[in-house]
Image (spheres, rainbow, N blue to C red):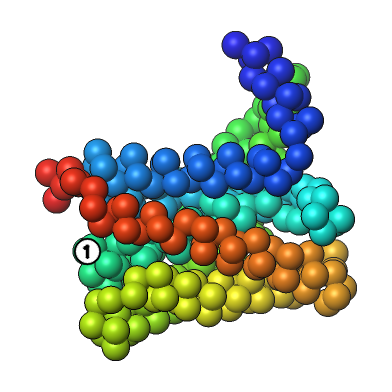
Amino acid sequence: MDNAIILLILNMQSIPSEALMVIEIIICILTILFFLKFFGLLGIATSATIMLIAANIQILKLAYFGWIHTEIALGTAAFASTYLISDIVTEIYGKQIAKKIVYITASAQLFFVILMIVTLGYQFSNDSSAHQSIENIFVPQIRILLVSIVSYVLSQLIDIAFFASIAKIMQGHFIWLRVNVSNFLSQIFDSILFSMLCWRIFSPDPKEISEILFVYVIFSFIPRFFIGIIITPIIYLAKSIKRNDVFI
């Protein structure tokens, strides 16, 4: 089994990053729809938690994208999906419920990392490879955790507020416009705030402003925003799905 997964990973590494991004977007969409369909509100809250935790681990890795001839921090598809989830919840269940899911998701991220820190505190055996692997991921995660929670919560609340406000102005119509306007404003805010805090202000090795702007802000925001546009039709599908909200 382990060898099969390693072989799968090696095969995927031969695929262009753009193609893998498409695959990841499809996985994110299916995850959202699956949890919404079978578990309703609790399910889509779970999918938001999955996306946020995955995105905050993925961002530690840079991948080369040939269309811009540079490396971009990953986590784009997963993180963009969290805004779609907030818009879906706001549209179906209301603004206050959407805010609660943002707080739940951020709290889950916090306690997840706390548990992993405790895991690192255990004395390890002679084989320290597993400990080192976890440490490589979650020690930098502390800085990312703190700034990501702040930027995530603030940007999501901005997204929810704009989405709900535009809905009132548009009398519930033009979902695509509400989604894209709120996503643009909230994601550009998140990209700037997160990148400056994480890679400049609180980084042990502060990066140049130009690198932050091009690698972590512009070249991460642009794909995220376009992914948001691409997956906008999913909110129409989500509204039409017969949901299982028996747990509420």
User: Percent x, y for residue 110?
Assistant: 49, 55
Q: Is residue 160 left or right of residue 95?
A: right
Is 105 drawn above or below residue 174 in the view shown? Answer: above
Say which of 77 and 158 sits in front. Answer: 77
Left or right: 126, with 228 as reference point: right
Image quadrant of residue 10? Answer: top right
- Residue pointed to by mark 1: 93
Q: Nearer the viewer, residue 35 or 157?
A: 35
**Picture residue at 78% right of the left edge, 74% below the top:** 213
Please tell me in which quadrant of the rendered image residue 171 appears.
bottom left
Picture residue at 29% right of the left edge, 68% below the top: 90
For disc 1, the neighbor class at 10 Å (few under 14, some 14 to 19, many from 20) is few
Left or right: where 17 falls relative to 205: left
Residue 48: x %, y % from top left: 41, 53
Residue pictured at 71% horizontal, 70% vertical: 217
Could you tell me residue 168's position as x and y percent?
A: 26, 85
Image quadrant in which you'd find residue 208: bottom right
Question: Is residue 128 something one can see in this rendering?
Answer: no
Residue 96 visible in image: yes
